Amino acid sequence: MKKLLYTFHVMAMILLSTLFVQSQTTDTLSMGPGYGNDIFYSMENGEVASAPRDNWDIAFYTPRFSAGIIVNEGYGGMQGYTTLYTYPYGDTSAWESVDTSNMALWKPLYNSPEYWEEGAFNRNSTGHPDYGWGWYNMVNHHLYYEDRRFIYYSLVNDEVVDREPDSQSWDIVFTRYFEELEAEGEIVPYLVAGAASNVDIGANNFHPVSLDFMDWSSEPFDSLKNTIGHDWKSFDFTTGWVILDSNVYFVQNFDGNVYKLIFTWWDGSTTGDFALEKQLVSLVDVDEFEQEVAEIEVYPNPATTQFNIRGKVDYKEPLTVSVYDQSGRRVHAFDTDAMELERGILVNRADFSTGLYIIQITGDNFTARQKLMIR
């Protein structure tokens, strides 16, 4: 009977995968005139929420053991945005007599186009525990919210703004942000409109390929914020906005399912309208996904010189911590126990190159995994 049920399960999964691969959906979306709204988008469910960009100034990254603070880039129409500076004439003791007469000459600080956690306020960071705007306290840690990626705040109105859907409900946000582009031989920040991937959402890009290209697994997924980005479109002064030809993306959502993504048109800032085609091309096995339990924390993430692994598990036997690279190769491993894991384990990154890794903790009939970005 067990063998029969297992066979039925496998056949059902194969059938479902085949049916889903054949389906294709076209979505027409709008960021509004001047790209005035952010669109939180799910590959499975389409548009989850739309939120105005002009009701907040700064936002706090919510995961525990994090100190990321971003500013509102693209605030208030095509030319407006919140700008952050480091005051050059003194520390907090000089705030009573701030001199802004030469403010136009100060160097602005921007959010990272690659990492959500590295906001403009963190640009002066020298690495853990110095996060740019302050030092991390190893004793009291800090408050966090599990159901939002950021907590937004309006300096003008002195209020917290709830503008973001549940952090696990969306894969991509269509928004405006500063990208680092080359101009006349120099790298300069430039305000663009495009797609930013949610934290831990993987994506890859293939160009030039035919639009029926399906070999998504031939390149690893990248979880950088701007993997999809903005340069799938360009402006031609004769014809207007043009979508990059022969260009295909694949996106892996939180469930592990893989979707094909093709942009079909972009209308620009006059309306903010655009369209895309999506197609489910790989359905993860239910048993495979159930092993992906997030019962551990890895911080800081992204990491530079070192990182910590911490968690509380109801498991008394010895545990093995393994670190895997994007190809699935185990590059580091050591044994530990539940007590040591709860206290926190400090790991130096000397043995790891830049890239995405999976931290896996295993015991007898127990598995927990968490992603880590090394940069």
Image: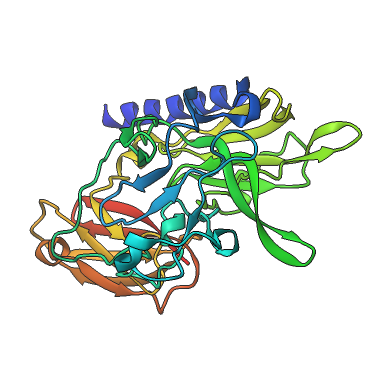
Query: Which one is in front, 175 or 206?
Result: 175
Q: Is residue 152 visible?
A: yes
Task: Examine the rendered structure and indicate whether residue 333 appears above or below residue 16.
Answer: below
Left or right, 317 with respect to 247, comes to: left
Left or right, 363 with respect to 249, comes to: left
Task: Examine the rendered structure and indicate whether residue 81 appears above or below residue 260.
Answer: below
Q: Looking at the rendering, in which quadrant would you find the N terminus?
A: top left
Q: Is residue 258 visible?
A: no
**Numbered label tally:** 0
Task: Examine the rendered structure and indicate whether residue 49 appears above or below residue 79.
Answer: above
**Residue 168 placement (x, y as % from top left):** 37, 35
Residue at point 31% right, 32% down? 3
Q: Residue furthest bottom?
A: 350
Left or right, 92 with respect to 188, comes to: left
Query: Which one is in front, 51 or 313?
Result: 51
Residue at point 48% right, 43% down? 72
Colouring of the image: rainbow
**Residue 104 placement (x, y as % from top left):** 59, 59
**Residue 38 placement (x, y as % from top left):** 52, 31
Residue at point 54% right, 24% down? 20
Residue at point 52% right, 52% down? 224
**Residue 76 placement (x, y as % from top left):** 56, 34
Q: Quadrant of residue 287?
A: top left
